[in-house]
Image (cartoon, grey):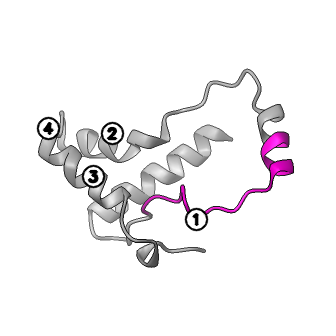
């Protein structure tokens, strides 16, 4: 399941980069998770290698451009990922 979530997140970044969809942004501050849900999830993921979601935008740009995006590209990606909450789409 973590790989599926990572792929969906990466797909949104790619679609936004190509102006096909709006940027998903960072959902870190918008998700509401109870302590019980968090404990159950941690228990279920014990021993599972998780992908690094923090740099998915950088990876999409590098892959899309066929190489490293450099420091300017990384700054742009960081700005996009930290966009204001009112621009984040909740389905």
Q: Position of residue 27 (x, y in %)?
A: 53, 59
Q: Marks 3 and 1, Cα distance to the nearest angstrom?
A: 19 Å
Q: Secondary structure at mark 1?
A: loop
> Residue visible at 38% across and 72% down?
22
Q: Secondary structure at mark 3?
A: helix
> Residue visible at 45% across and 78% down?
86
Q: Which mark is residue 30?
A: 1
Q: Position of residue 43 (x, y in %)?
A: 83, 32
Task: Kindly check if marks 4 and 1 are in contact, taking CB atoms under 8 A apart as contact.
Answer: no
Q: Depth check: 26 or 8 in front?
A: 26
Q: In the image, is residue 5 part of the stretch drawn in magenta?
A: no
Q: In the image, is residue 34 part of the stretch drawn in magenta?
A: yes
> Residue visible at 39% across and 71% down?
84
> Is label 3 or label 2 in front?
3
Q: Marks 3 and 2, Cα distance to the nearest angstrom?
A: 10 Å
> Is label 3 or label 1 in front?
1
Q: Marks 4 and 1, Cα distance to the nearest angstrom?
A: 29 Å
- Residue that numbered label 3 is attached to: 77
> Is label 2 or label 1 in front?
1
Name the quadrant containing residue 47. top right
Q: Which residues are magenta?
A: 25-40
- Residue that numbered label 4 is attached to: 70
Q: Marks 3 and 4, Cα distance to the nearest angstrom?
A: 11 Å
Residue 36 left/right relative to 21: right
């Amino acid at each position: 399941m973590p790989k599926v979530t990572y792929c969906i997140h990466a797909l949104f970044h790619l679609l936004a980069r190509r102006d096909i969809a709006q940027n998903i942004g960072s959902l870190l501050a918008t998700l509401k998770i109870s302590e019980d849900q968090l404990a159950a999830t941690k228990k279920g993921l014990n021993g599972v290698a998780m992908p690094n979601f923090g740099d998915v935008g950088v990876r999409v740009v590098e892959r899309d451009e066929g190489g490293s995006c450099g420091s300017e590209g990384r700054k742009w990606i960081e700005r996009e990922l930290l966009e204001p909450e009112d621009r984040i789409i909740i389905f």
